[in-house]
Amino acid sequence: MEPVIEFKDFSFKYRAQTEPTLRDINLSIMPGEKVLIVGPSGSGKSTLAHCINGLVPFSYPGDMTGTLRVGGKNPSEIGLFGVSQIVGTVLQDTDGQFIGLTVAEDLAFSLENNLIPQEEMFVKVDEVAELVDVKNLLDHSPRELSGGQKQRVSMGGVMVEDVEVLLFDEPLANLDPATGKRAIALIDQIQKNRKSTIVIIEHRLEDALYRDVDRIIVVGEGRIVADASPDELLVMDVLKEQGIREPLYITALKHAGCSISAEDKPQHIETMKLDAYQKSLQTWFDRAEPKEKKARSASALTVEDLYFSYVEGKPILQHIHFDIKKGEMVSIVGKNGAGKSTLSNLICGFYKPTRGRILLNGEDVAPLSIKERGEKIGLVMQSPNQMISKPMIYEEVALGLAVRGVPEEEIKERVYETLKICGLYPFRKWPVSALSFGQKKRVSIASILVMNPEVLILDEPTAGQDYRHYTEIMEFLKNINENFGITIIMITHDMHLMLEYTDRAIVIADGHLIADDTPAKILTNEQIADKAYLKKTSLYDLAVNCQIDNPSEFVERFITYERKQRAAEGKENPENG
């Protein structure tokens, strides 16, 4: 059998660069295989994907050496259209992929281009809509769908062509955990039904392994550093070396001093053989320190019996109530469309509640204007591009102070001080366009921090970040929380973030508050996890399967241990902070 994708001694250098992005790639993917490609940001994995779907060299020109075959053909000879008949791509940002005014039109777009007769087109669109479970959405506009629904429509749009290869670029990036699981299950089902070749590029390794994959390919600094089955790869140290987060249960077993064997099938915690590790894990649990109790401080932000509707009679939020203490780090979680962002907009004063009150330091904020609230409560949006409006870093961070008429000398002092805190001082004279996504994120945080807010709300602070950048941003937020006493609220889909960095999680489902507890208790409670589209942590399954009496206490001790380890590493490498 011939490979459907084959790289031989392949290297590629973008025109604007001096060094190749891909070097000496040798890789064969066989028809019907399901392959996961992982690697840190800048490793070359996206370029590898662009070579497979023809964007390199047609949209991103450069110099190639070696050979590449897709469907047995040379992409340079068959052109972008030729490659698109073999490889269908589902983009991370699904909005960039919609063309039709309705879901049905969008699914039919490529068939119309190929002059397929209308009767045949209806049958084909129906068939694909059934397969990706969007049949009841055919007359909806793609723009009004949820993240998970948009993704299913995108899948349908590329499958309608009967392509051999389906390429998924970070399919989990914008999805809540339960919708992410469904997406992975759907990709698996498509592969089994269609016998398609599947290539998935993803940062979230543990979530992507919810269903079996044949191989994991690890890309690092433009080279393939590992190509192995999941069971083989998870027992190597290559993930840690490349800065990729391994599944949490693997990390926990390593903390307990276990030497994990590929024969015990570590790909899935549910089916892994754990008998050999049980004793070591119990010993580690008995010795591990419990979580320290924090002293309670005064209230920073209190929400009392809050209700809100855009349209009368259709409530978005009902009876929301919680009290966040000064200096806390809290996560707000729940499925896409649960009302989390609406809640942050109410706190910032962009909307007025239908009923209920919001208090800051015990005072009702209703009389304050948006500008006055903005001086005390800062909001950092998910994408820095939504916030940045000035070309230069200094100007962007100074903007809020300049608008408020702060004297120039004081602006300079405060901006420089904030840039130092954010690790951006060396770039103070740089243009924003020269920064990476993670650095731009820091600029958007700096432009809020310079106002000296008491409460900072961040919407998906780590979306689309690899593990290294994720850790950088989160350690930086933890640092400003601990050293400057700023209360931090994070709206997030990331269960790891919730576990590792916040001491409390407020859970919203269908407009109601359904839990306010420690992340460990929430992520070991199947009922709450199901209702709010969260994902029960694999640490819970590990504890239960190893017969540890108190699984949520096991999760707490794991987090405490990890935090202490990270703090010790931070002291050893202070320049990373």
Image: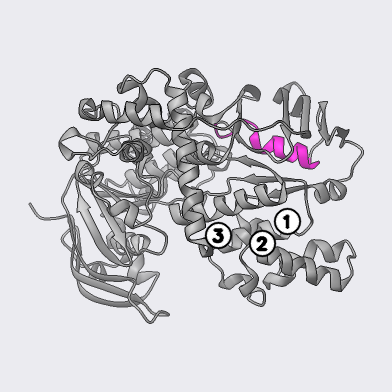
Q: Which residues are magenta?
A: 335-350
The location of residue 48, given as percent across then percent down, is 31, 62
Disc 3 and disc 1 in contact, CB within 8 angstroms: no
Q: Earlier in the sequence, mark 3 or mark 1?
A: 1
Residue position for label 1:
449
Disc 1 and disc 2 in contact, CB within 8 angstroms: yes
Residue position for label 2:
421
Whether 340 is among the magenta residues is yes
Q: Please, is residue 335 above or below residue 2 in the view?
A: above
Q: 442 or 388, which lies in front? A: 442
Amino acid on which the number 2 mark rests in the picture: Ile
Residue position for label 3:
577
- Asked if one can make out residue 105 in the rendered structure from this viewpoint, the answer is no
The location of residue 189, given as percent across then percent down, is 28, 33
Q: Please, is residue 164 above or below residue 77 in the view?
A: above
- Specify few, some or many for label 1: CA neighbours under 10 Å numbering under 14, 14-19, or 20 or more: many
The location of residue 514, given as percent across then percent down, is 61, 21
